[in-house]
Image: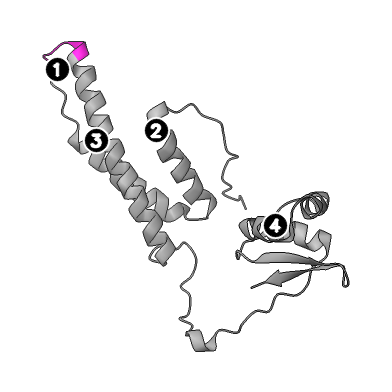
Amino acid sequence: MTEDKTPPSEMIRVPTALIPVVRQLSKLHRQGHTIALLQALEELVSQFDSNIDIDNSGKLEEKLEKLESHLGNKLETITKKLEQMEKAIASGKYSNTRPRRQVYSHQQPQVELLPRTNESLAQRLGVTAQSIITERETKTAQEFISWSRNRDPMSTGWEWNAKTERYHPVK
């Protein structure tokens, strides 16, 4: 039995004008929206291919200018389409996972965040335990709450309590 594994990512050179679009595509891919992304890209490429109409009778320079103009317009179209895709993905319209059951807000349990140690908060914020300590010691309490809120996946701020030697969530 052979497994169809995706090859490891490769570094590629991209024209400067395409860098923002490639970054958006990469972000969507990392978020796991690969199927929706590939479908939308196929649609865009087919539109792109079907609309190219270069007059072969002119000079090379004229052809290049026409192509650059065409690519600039297509780049705008791709950027707009990517923005639409991001909105659709965020709204749940596209998903490469099984459909989710609809959960009504009155059925959702409130998750209470428990106090955390340096190590567990560091893991949650994606930093080292030492950097948590350093930030706590060099910032004011409010600055630390803001710093931790900006790194927390649920945008929760965290406050140090010296008595319990734990970080507590700030609402």
- The kind of residue on which mark 2 rests is Leu
> Could you tell me which residue is drawn at 37 percent across and 61 percent down?
88
20 over 141 or under it: above or below: above
State the residue in front, 35 or 72. Answer: 72
133 over 79 or under it: above or below: below
Residue position marked by numbered label 3 in the rendering: 73
State the residue in front, 145 or 38. Answer: 145
Horizontal side of 65 relative to 37 (left or right) equals left
- The kind of residue on which mark 4 rests is Leu
Do the residues bearing badges 2 and 4 touch, measured as CB atoms within 8 Å? no
Which of the 4 image quadrants contains residue 84?
bottom left
Q: CA distance from mark 3 to mark 4?
A: 40 Å
What is the secondary structure assignment of the residue under circle 2?
A: helix
Q: CA distance from mark 2 to mark 3?
A: 12 Å
- The kind of residue on which mark 3 rests is Asn
Farthest residue to the bottom: give it. Answer: 106
> Circle 4: is it few (<14), some (14-19), or many (20+) Cα within 10 Å?
some
Do the residues bearing badges 3 and 4 touch, measured as CB atoms within 8 Å? no
> Circle 3: is it few (<14), some (14-19), or many (20+) Cα within 10 Å?
few
Residue position marked by numbered label 2 in the rendering: 18
